[in-house]
Image (cartoon, rainbow, N blue to C red):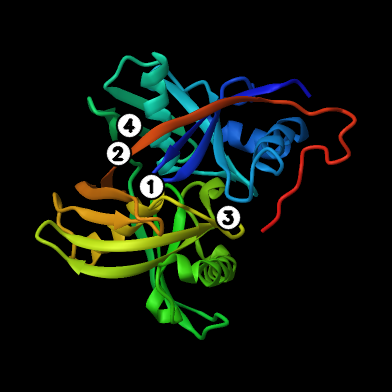
Amino acid sequence: MDDVSVVDYHTAGEPFRIVTSVEIPGASVADRRVTAQRSAAIDAVRQLLVNEPRGHADMYGGFVVPADDDGADFGVVFWHKDGYSTACGHGTIALATWALDTGLVQGPEVTIDVPSGRVTARVDAARGVAFRNVPSYVLRRQVPVPTARGDVLADISYGGAFYASVPASALGLSVTPACYTELIAAGRSIKWALDSSAVHPSDPRLSGLYGTILYDDLGDGADGPHQRNLAVFADGEADRSPCGSGTSARLALLHDEGRLRVGQTLRHDSIVGTTFLGRVVSQTPDGVITEVTGSAYRTGTATFSLDPRDPLGTGFTLR
């Protein structure tokens, strides 16, 4: 395997590793994601970058690829420790920042094709990023799911990926570092229990429950609701940020409940105290258009190698 160079960012505490050197065949970003899933050579690069000793169980990143057409600046295939996701809000924020930092896009608007569709981002003078997602919607309400802490009810919604939302209090927990291990275990079990319940209406490649959002409701301010969450996605990976696509999924639920009107703002905090601001900007027949605002910061660059004599190969993951 050739050496792989990366640029690392974090968005609200969540890592995002950017790779521009991997070519992935396909007619669209969605097709390229499928190609990456099926290609041992491409997936070996993902494993090299996400696994220890070069990564860790909560590493996240993406392969920058061509856009679907001239309407976007570039595309991205997102990846994590278990495979390839359909959407990533914190990654979108990082990529928009990187695109301006490198001069790839002059800005302030950056348009990115992701597996779930086309998203747009606007970068302000202070490098804050507001991105507008694909339509978000409620799929199912009050779905019963058994857990080791008792039966709970989950609301399933879509924000480029499907999430099950459950109040942490229903599990006897709160979204705090002291409950971190228990939150991951609960979120992981809910995700797998409901995985087949999340079926995309038109594209089976987008089906499957991506994660569980465990949240604390902190009441309503003058501008709208205030909540804190931990998104547990893939197979027990914990988002350090408030989760961008998950924020869109939460916005769809809150709007559907009548708790968040168009123009109001959800203050969405993470388990580490960082914040995204989310709002519903419009309604369409396919769902609500959401805007999520956050910031990303460059943390470093690296070139990773694989010594052919290394018995650990592309590495390992400990959870």
Q: Are marks 1 and 3 in contact (CB under 8 Å)?
A: no
Give the labeled residue for mark 2.
132
Q: Residue at x 50, y 61 (%)?
A: 198
Task: Name the N-terminal-most of marks 4 and 1.
Answer: 4
Which of the two marks, 2 or 3, is nearer to us in this view?
A: 3
Q: Are marks 2 and 4 in contact (CB under 8 Å)?
A: yes
Residue 263: x and y, percent?
13, 49
Q: Residues within 10 Å of mark 3 (few under 14, many from 20)?
A: many
Q: CA distance from mark 2 to mark 4?
A: 5 Å
Q: CA distance from mark 1 to mark 2?
A: 10 Å
Which of the two marks, 1 or 2, is nearer to us in this view?
A: 1
Q: Residue at x 59, y 60 (%)?
A: 236
On screen, residue 129 versus residue 235, left or right, reads left
Task: Name the N-terminal-most of marks 2 and 3.
Answer: 2
Is residue 80 visible to the viewer in this orientation of the structure?
yes
Q: Residues within 10 Å of mark 4 (few under 14, many from 20)?
A: many
Task: Name the N-terminal-most of marks 1 and 2.
Answer: 2
Give the labeled residue for mark 1.
244
